[in-house]
Image (spheres, grey):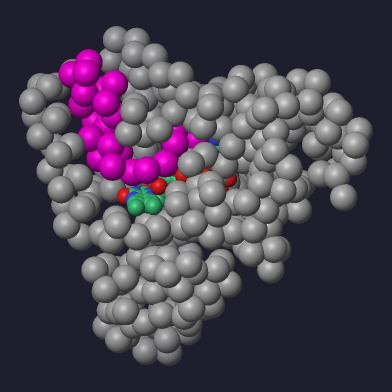
Amino acid sequence: MILDAVIYELEKIIDKEHIRYNEPMKNHTSFRVGGPADIFILPEKTWQVISAIKILKENSIPFFVMGNGTNLVVKDGGYKGAVIKLTSINNIKVEGNKIRAQAGAFLSNVSIEALKNSLKGMEFASGIPGTVGGAVAMNAGAYGPEIKDIIESAVLTDYDGNLYCFNKEELQLSYRSSIIQRENYIVLEATFALEKGDVIAIKNRMEELNRRRAEKQPLNFPSAGSTFKRPEGHFAGKLIEDAGLKGYSIGGAKVSEKHAGFIINYNNATAKDVLELIKKVQEVVYEKFNVMLEPEIKIIGED
Ligand SMILES: Cc1cc2nc3c(=O)[nH]c(=O)nc-3n(C[C@H](O)[C@H](O)[C@H](O)COP(=O)(O)OP(=O)(O)OC[C@H]3O[C@@H](n4cnc5c(N)ncnc54)[C@H](O)[C@@H]3O)c2cc1C
């Protein structure tokens, strides 16, 4: 049960229209699965995020910060607490060879700004469907480069509302991991250091990578991208394919026939279908190749 006092406090700082109750999370995840969040908050200003987490923390209400939900599975029982979605905090500013972007800005939009200003280095990110905050937290990457290669610094808050500006080293970015995930920080803004380049070459590179993405990935079905991290010395998709699991399904969730590294929601899957399929894939791959696949996607909520 949500305390009336908490609702009262939240509605004092955030417009009522931007707070929802029992909000189905399947509407906010690219997998299109997930039960309701007790409270769902869409702040428009950074200070609202900080004030909201203070209120939630003081009242012992669990909370989860999300971007575009493209690396996320919310279980069917929903999230008992508050989900704070940052996509309405999305300013992007170009300052010379640098781009400063708020956490909720889409990577695709940041990449377009880079292109418009003949700045190279962000081409790899133009087809990743997440936000700046999600990408920094995950150290997202594609076709070689990752966020680590272009980030200069990020403004963060901890769960007590203390602000920090961390440089690249302090962010401790490694393969799909960062200090943000490990020590519970929230990304509010990031600055990317890019280089002047040739606008046509930048555009061509973006188009080429997005063509490769469309050719190889099942983009016409809901998913959360690569389901598993790349295990040392292997490729998850190859192991899954070699284990004979391409096209294997549980309920409405299926190992994509186009790319075995992707689990797709091909027919009204529940989160339970997706999670059972993940477990099955892990078991079979472990049995055949002695490699334990670790999910890349984040899983929250209750069964
Ligand atoms: C079709 C498809 C293709 C994809 N291709 C790629 C790819 O090529 N490379 C790649 O790396 N990923 C890829 N992904 C996965 C996903 O887009 C990235 O991981 C992305 O960075 C997630 O961003 P998001 O805003 O959607 O984060 P969410 O899914 O909303 O959240 C993911 C995690 O980040 C945390 N998070 C989000 N915002 C913040 C914040 N402001 N502060 C702190 N933590 C935060 C969340 O708490 C959660 O733990 C793909 C996904 C899809 C659906």
**In the rendering, at what x and y percent does residue 301 appear?**
67, 59
Give how far across and how far down residue 90 sits, in percent: 48, 24
**Residue 149 visible from this viewpoint:** no
Q: In percent of the image, x 69 and y 63: which residue is there?
A: 77
In this picture, which residue range is highlighted in magenta? Answer: 111-133
The spot of residue 214 in percent (x, y) is 20, 53
Give the quarter of the figure containing the C terminus.
bottom right
Query: Viewed as shown, does residue 4 lie left or right of 144?
Result: right
Q: Nearer the viewer, residue 180 or 282?
A: 282
Q: Is residue 8 highlighted in magenta? A: no
The answer to if 132 sits in the magenta stretch is: yes
Left or right of 42 on screen, residue 296:
left
Decide which of 240, 78 is in the foreground and name it.
Answer: 78
Query: How many labels were placed on the picture?
Result: 0
Is residue 197 in sight in this rendering? yes
Q: Residue at x 62, y 63 (%)?
A: 75
Using the image as rendered, state which of residue 125 and residue 230 is in the foreground. 125
Q: Residue furthest top?
A: 96
- Where 253 falls versus 99 (above or below)? below
Q: Position of residue 116 (x, y in %)?
A: 22, 18
- Vertical placement of residue 48 versus 184, above or below: above
